[in-house]
Image: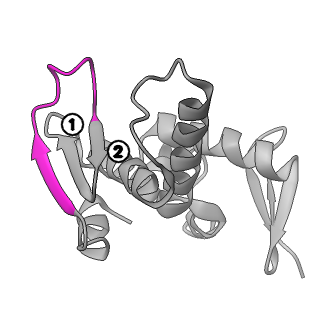
Amino acid sequence: MTYEELQLQYDDLFIMETDLSKINGLKGLYYDSCIAIDKNMTQSEKGCVLAEEIGHHLTSIGDILDQKIQDNQKQEYRARKVAYDIKIGLVGIINAFEAGCKDVYQIAEFLDVTKDFFEDALSCYKSKYGIYTKLDNYIIYFYPTLNVGKIF
């Protein structure tokens, strides 16, 4: 889902682009159904950040800016897991392989995410599912490398 598609799907949120570069490297910020996105990023980066801020909208409670607090770290991770599912998901990985994508760069481009975001998602999925998981008629291997096979 592209940045623009996310904006349309979550039209109940007020989403604005602004210059957040002066706020300690912040790329996005969520507060009370309002999302600020740093305007100084690529569309793919904005989409990844917006997905995470939507994750905060769906899962986070209170001010979690202080990441030295363990509960805040847990809420941050929960929001990122939601972002991975919004932007990628197991179906997205399968679709990328069906489209002929062969490496992380091609898959990330196909899914309109950054390479780092995709690799972080894979790490999360490996932690969640282990070496592999099955979905419908597919098996997705996360170890030793990402691979998708069709089950007949």
Horizontally, residue 24 falls left or right of residue 86, namely left
- Residue lying at 55% horizontally and 41% vertically, measured from the top left: 75
> Residue 49's mark?
2
> Residue 41's mark?
1
**The C terminus - image quarter:** bottom right
Q: Does residue 110 appear anywhere in the picture?
A: no
Residue 57 place in picture, x, y as percent: 39, 57
- Residue lying at 84% horizontally and 38% vertically, measured from the top left: 144
Three-letter amino acid code at the position of disc 2: Val
Q: Is mark 2 on a helix, strand or loop?
A: helix
29 or 43: nearer the viewer: 29
Count up the numbered dots: 2
38 or 88: nearer the viewer: 38
**The N terminus - image quarter:** bottom left
Question: Which color scheme does this rendered protein use?
Answer: one colour
The 10 Å Cα crowd at callout 1, few under 14, some 14 to 19, many 20 or more, is few
60 or 136: nearer the viewer: 60
Occupied quadrant, residue 139: bottom right
* Relative to 91, residue 80 above or below: above
Residues shaded magenta: 14-27
Look at the image and say whether residue 91 sits in the magenta stretch. no
Q: Is mark 1 on a helix, strand or loop?
A: loop
Residue 3 place in picture, x, y as percent: 28, 59
